[in-house]
Amino acid sequence: MSERIENKGEGCGAGCSCGAEAPGLLVSPMDRRKFLSLGAYAAAAAALAACAPVATNVTSPGSVSATVKVSDYSTLATVGGVAVTTVNGTPVAIVRTGATSFITLSRVCPHQGSTIGQISGGFRCPNHGATFNTTGGWVGGQRTSNMQSYATTYNAAAGTLTIG
């Protein structure tokens, strides 16, 4: 990348040893200030690209498999209750969404892999402040994708949830 500057001097032009392509124009090399300025722009662009929303969830295991007893978690006795636990080494939140319906969410942040904590009305990543509602949808803070959910089946007769 080069800049062109005007030369007000006489006798400069095509064929001159200064390298001008036409009379009155000189080609100047990139100076230190310009180089550092362009480098700062490139670093800022890279940082902004790293903050873009994550399109896919690469920080949580693709699946977990377990069966849990609903009665083991007193918070799941009522609709809207949330049980924060670990299933096969993966931190999860089990949410009772109806009389016979539940969802299981990975508590591994879809943005940076931190363990998401429970807050009033949902969840929050302690690392970058993204907040999620009780069904795992992103609602505020640093933009990211929704929390990953796992297939969850309720067996009312046995009082168990099959996750995965």
Image (cartoon, rainbow, N blue to C red):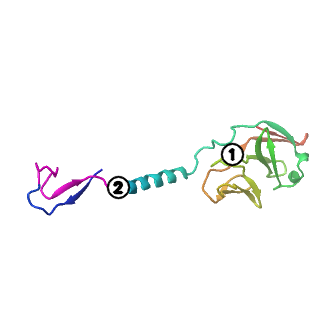
Residue 57 image point, x, y percent? 63, 43
Q: Is residue 143 left or right of residue 78?
A: left
- Does residue 118 sit above or below 87 in this rendering? below
Residue 98 horizontal/vertical position (percent): 81, 52
Q: Quadrant of residue 119?
A: bottom right
Indicate the position of residue 130 as horizontal and vertical percent values: 65, 57
Amino acid under label 1?
Gln
On-image quarter of the C terminus? top right
Secondary structure category for the residue under label 1: loop
Compare marks 2 and 1 and give the one earlier in the sequence. Answer: 2
Q: Residue at x 60, y 43 (%)?
A: 56
The reply to whether callout 2 and callout 1 are in contact (CB within 8 Å) is no
Q: Which mark is residue 148?
A: 1
Q: Indicate yes or no whether the magenta region holds residue 25.
A: yes
Name the disc covering residue 32, or none. Answer: 2
Find numbered disc 2 in the image and state the secondary structure of the residue it sits on.
helix
> Of the residues shown, which amino acid type is indicated by label 2?
Arg
Q: Residues within 10 Å of mark 2 (few under 14, many from 20)?
A: few
- As measured in the structure, the alpha-carbon distance from the residue carrying label 2 to the one carrying label 1 is 47 Å
**Magenta region: which residues?**
13-33
Residue closer to the observer: 82 or 29: 29
Q: Residue, x 77% and y 46% (percent of image)? A: 92
Q: Residue at x 83, y 55 (%)?
A: 81
